[in-house]
Image (cartoon, rainbow, N blue to C red):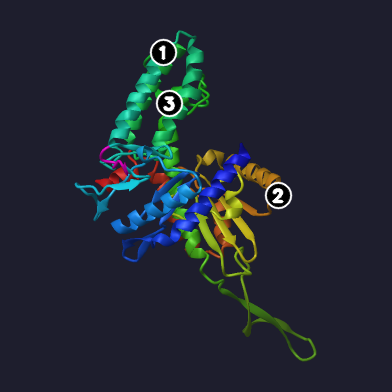
Amino acid sequence: MHNITNTLRNAMEVILKAAEGSAGPANLGGGCSMPLLKAFMDDTTIICSKEEETRRMLARLDTLMTWCRMKFKPKKSRSLSTRKGKIEKKAVTFTVAEQQIPTVSQESVKSLGRWYDSSMRDTRRGVETVQFASEGLLAINKCGIQGKFQVWCLQFMLIPKLLWPLLVYDICCSTVESIEAKINKYTRKWLGVPPGLSDVAMYCRKAKLKLPMKSILEEYKCGKRHNRVLQELASVISTAKGQSNPPSPSFTIFTTEGGAREWCGRSNTASTQRKGLLDGCDDWGVSADLPEWDKHPEVIRRTTLRPDIVIYSPSTQQVIMVELTVPYESRMEQAHTYKKENLTKELEESGYRAKIMPIEIGARGFAGSSAYDLLSKLTISGNKRTKALKLPAETAENSRKQFPLDLVQKK
């Protein structure tokens, strides 16, 4: 099965490479452009600036697929035409394999686990997620098994299905709170605890009732908080890689005639540079596990690892992986040890040599010593280091509030 998957992936890559010359990259204005073709296995996305380029690209791909004795499925494909950021009312239609491709306005489409419709908003997905949670809880409640097994079904069957839409869609915090209220209501019923038992008593690790799962609201906030802090930290590291190491003053020992007296003086000619992780080459690149950042290098994508930030140098074949954790301050040391051991084990099994630097920025706005150590090794010290860590720390603290920052920005 693995060989078949690799063969299909390689075949699609050859086909897309042959079709790249049919049109140029999509021009977004302001000097910004996007790749013409994006693909994941046999799913292909075409992004063009002009209608004639899109038709030419579709015709070229159709010809190549015919040569390979394959064909597209127009019924499973969708087209979307926008002008100045808005969907055109009279959408342009395209054809492939002598059949018309439906538009997103006519039929919604699911791509890579995410639904797209004509509204291009996630408001409807929030309502659907609440409805799915209600139906799932009702089905578990009617199954007729013991309460502890119903909680097991909730933990391993329903909650994982709910976390995916909360991750890929922009669902507001109040919607997640309503889902959590429904979950807590049924959980109290299944465990036989009083209805007035607080949420803190249910999910507290030091209380009598030690549930083997976290609150879904906390899971939602942790995911959003991690991405926000990672965005700020990646920006700090990206700016640091382009800075040259500041020279540190060198000192010379002066001695009087006869060696009667010695003293240390500063030399005006000789100077040395502070040693850092990025010394030795100037082609360092930075990638982050975020949609708007560059993809990780091929040496990382071939493994099962998904580090948060990768600093790499193609010429010297060096890789520095940075893993971010946003724990509570009381568990910083445990989080650091867990990350380092896991990543080291996977690297040794894969046969790669790289440097791993787990760092922690607490959920209450305190940066761990590992974060200071990382910036020091990147030759950022003193006031610059303090200012660089201030924004990620504030982002982690603000993400703990009841309403996420993205809702405040929308208002």
| Residue farthest toward the right in the current orientation of the protein | 258
Q: Position of residue 262 (x, y in %)?
A: 73, 83
Q: Which residue is identified by label 3?
A: 200
* Disc 2 residue crowd, few under 14, some 14–19, many 20+, Cα 10 Å: few
Kind of residue at disc 2: Gly
- Foreground disc of the pair 2, 1: 2
Inspect the magenta stretch and tell me whether residue 102 lies in it: yes
Q: Position of residue 392 (x, y in %)?
A: 44, 52
Secondary structure found at label 3: helix
The answer for how far apart the CA atoms under marks 2 and 1 are is: 48 Å
Q: What span is colored magenta in the figure?
A: 100-106
Kind of residue at disc 3: Val
Q: Which residue is identified by label 1?
A: 141
Which label number is shown at residue 351? 2
Residue 244 versus residue 259 in the image, above or below:
above
Q: Position of residue 195 (x, y in %)?
A: 37, 14
Tell whether 114 sits left or right of 285.
left
- Foreground disc of the pair 3, 1: 1
